[in-house]
Image (cartoon, rainbow, N blue to C red):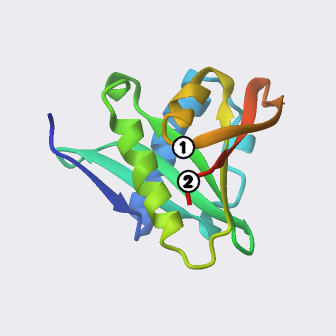
Amino acid sequence: MPKLTIKKVENENDLKIAQHIREIVFCDEQKVSKEIEFDGLDDICDHFLVLKYNEPIGTARLREKDPGVFKIERVAVLKKNRLNGIGKMLIKEVINMAVNNENLNILFLHSQVYVKDFYKKLGFKEEGQEFLEDEIPHIKMIFEYF
């Protein structure tokens, strides 16, 4: 198993790296528009980077939408590093960060439908109906293990 670390983004350079990973995964691969992907909310979010031998390969962000209501967003792992447990490790770390916030009441995310089973295995439960975000089917999922 390669040496993997997850770190919270603490500076502008690391944020740019996280944004570049998102651009590759969402804009280039999935054809999400840059206007939607880069929604102007990065400055009010906590961001995380996954490093493999100190090389950035994944990212996620955590945003407090309302007092006590946190949303995991922009989860992206570079293609050649997928299906190796890296996404699972990243989400677990983001969950831990959220759960350690004493204000947390609700933790949720909008999963692309084709990966909802991944989130179910990590303790999320579907809520509501499927919907489209930039023409991609999504489902709201709530973390249910507090």
Residue nearest the observer in this picture, 21 or 95 = 95
Quadrant where the C terminus sits is: bottom right
CB contact under 8 Å: marks 2 and 1:
yes
In percent of width and height, residue 19 lies at 51, 48
The crowding category of the residue bearing disc 1, from other C-alpha atoms within 10 Å (few below 14, some 14 to 19, many at least 20), is: some
Residue 123, numbered label: 1
Residue extending farthest to the front is 145
Residue extending farthest to the bottom is 102
The structure residue drawn at horizontal position 20% and vertical position 49%, both measured from the top left corner, is 54
Q: In this view, does 78 lie to the left or right of 126?
A: left
The structure residue drawn at horizontal position 46% and vertical position 65%, both measured from the top left corner, is 97
For residue 29, above or below residue 121: above
In percent of width and height, residue 56 lies at 31, 45
Q: In whole angstroms, how far apart are the C-alphas of marks 2 and 1?
A: 6 Å
Q: Is mark 1 on a helix, strand or loop?
A: loop
- Amino acid type, mark 2: Tyr
Residue 54, numbered label: none
Q: Is residue 94 left or right of residue 140?
A: left
Q: What element carries label 2?
A: loop
Asked which quadrant contains residue 30, the reply is: top right
Residue nearest the observer in this picture, 44 or 38 = 44
The structure residue drawn at horizontal position 34% and vertical position 37%, both measured from the top left corner, is 86
The structure residue drawn at horizontal position 41% and vertical position 37%, both measured from the top left corner, is 87
Going from N to C along the chain, the mark reached first, 2 or 1, is 1
Quadrant where the N terminus sits is: top left
Please name the residue that numbered disc 2 is placed on: 145
In percent of width and height, residue 73 lies at 61, 48
For residue 117, above or below residue 16: above
- Amino acid type, mark 1: Gly
In percent of width and height, residue 113 lies at 67, 24
Q: In this view, does 40 lie to the left or right of 8?
A: right
